[in-house]
Image: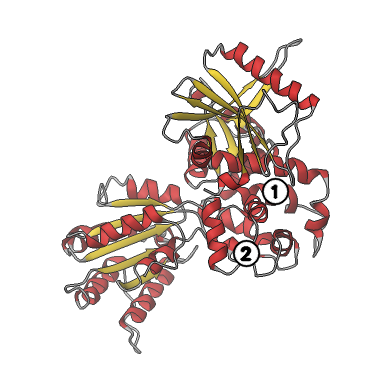
Amino acid sequence: MSEAIIGRDAEKKILKEMLDSKEAELIAILGRRRVGKTFLVRGYYQQQLVFECTGLHEAGLADQLLNFSQALQQAMQSAIPPATPDSWMQAFTFLSDFLQTKINKQPVVVLFDEFPWMHTPKSGFLTAFGHWWNTWASRQPKLKVVICGSAASWMIENVLHNRGGLHNRVSQTIRLLPFSLKESEAYLLSRGIRLDRYQVLQLYMAMGGIPQYLKQANKGESANQVIDKLFFEKDGMLKTEFNVLYRSLFDNASHHESIVRQLAKKASGMSRNEVIAACGFTTGGTTTRLFEELEQSGFITQYIPFEKTSRDAVYKLSDEYSLFYLKFVDRARAMGAGTWHKIAAGSSYNSWSGYAFEAICQKHVAQIKVALGISGVYTEASGWRYTPKPGEAGAQIDLLLDRQDYCINMCEMKFADKAFVIDKKYALELDRKVAVFRERTRTRKTVFPTMITTYGTKQNIYYTGRIISEVTMADLFI
């Protein structure tokens, strides 16, 4: 049943528990567009799924109800369409009548996909859904209702934090995240696509672990060819995706886009106030909500610097696709086949690949800990920077693993197409970083300079005695 579903082990376990439970269950699945929510539910609940309705984007009440009626017709496998309901209250009555014929000894699953889109202004959808759940659905022990939504912030506010009929009614929430590197590799292999890890990493750096994007890779294409095809050729899927992506998730998406555009310019991240100033926003509840919505949907990530509080948080753009698009595709003059091959030979590629690799390492801290043999040690991952006063030395460290066993791994992340070489200049830079960090933080912990690279670090006089541990690209695929 679930063989074709790559990874998602924790999620499959939850779906199984819900199916085996002795009572009605309401399961909310959150996750950005194209991350595989519907695929997971259809794939796992293939045998039990008896009704599925997908909300229409930016459609009015009449169209939503007609769409519901057509979904019901499909579920009934009837040649004659049922009457279109006058309201959502009536729609749910129709649904109960249909489900009554299906619910016997075996569990049945109902899926509402793009749930937020069904709730149009003044339609009474949420009220009707809450009423249906409380008065009828929740009393059917064999019934499992799954609601999915790409608009994570809407789902959290209106369903999970609902103060009305749906208050505390959700049995389980699944937040479906993009694939890790390991899952991306497994997914490509399941489609017969064999690429070495360097190529998988390059694909991931450009589009992240979004199954629907990775699905566009064909057998026999290199990572560069796939990127060229999707981003730069005439009808490339990822050339137009950006405009749709934010609009399908957020109301007034232009504000969300402004934040993302500002963060794309600054690899080291920006404080909340810096972002607000750059976008020309005012501080307040509305702006706070923009940050929360982008964070809930996985586009930006908040990092709290070493030994600081959330007041000093730095925001970074953590969505690989958005970063790549804004850096190379948005407002680009050069387009057409072969564009990416040209760009990949230039200096803008080097600065982007360095940043993209760092961002991926920050998402794979669990794998880095395994590689360092410290997975059992409580660790806090953070970054640190010291902005110098005149005459002082500054320093920036993008990843620190602060361990409970009184050690700190100070990680240097380097993306290269061969073994990384530490030269005299870089060795001095490393020593200076360690010295400034020790001096400014007054830490008593042992600092271990740690290299995280694609193909390892060349052992030379500058490596020996300086670098304590290292992690390679292969370790990120654990």
Residue situated in front as seen by the camera: 432 or 249: 432
Tell me which residue sits at (48%, 22%) in the image.
Answer: 309
Classify mark 2: residues with Cα within 10 Å, few (<14), some (14-19) or many (20+).
some
| Residue 405 against residue 43 in the figure, above or below | above
| Residue 71 against residue 299 in the figure, above or below | below
Residue situated in front as seen by the camera: 371 or 97: 371
Where is residue 453 shown, x and y percent of the image?
66, 40
Where is residue 98 shown, x and y percent of the image?
24, 76
Classify mark 1: residues with Cα within 10 Å, few (<14), some (14-19) or many (20+).
some
| Residue 53 against residue 157 in the figure, above or below | below
Tell me which residue sits at (43%, 30%) in the image.
Answer: 377
Helix, strand or loop at label 1? It is helix
Which residue is tagged 2? 194
Determine which of the numbered discs, if any, sits on residue 326 in the image. Answer: 1
Question: Does residue 429 appear left or right of residue 137 in this picture?
Answer: right
Question: Does residue 437 appear left or right of residue 131 in this picture?
Answer: right
Question: Does residue 69 appear left or right of residue 291 in this picture?
Answer: left
Where is residue 152 shown, x and y percent of the image?
44, 50
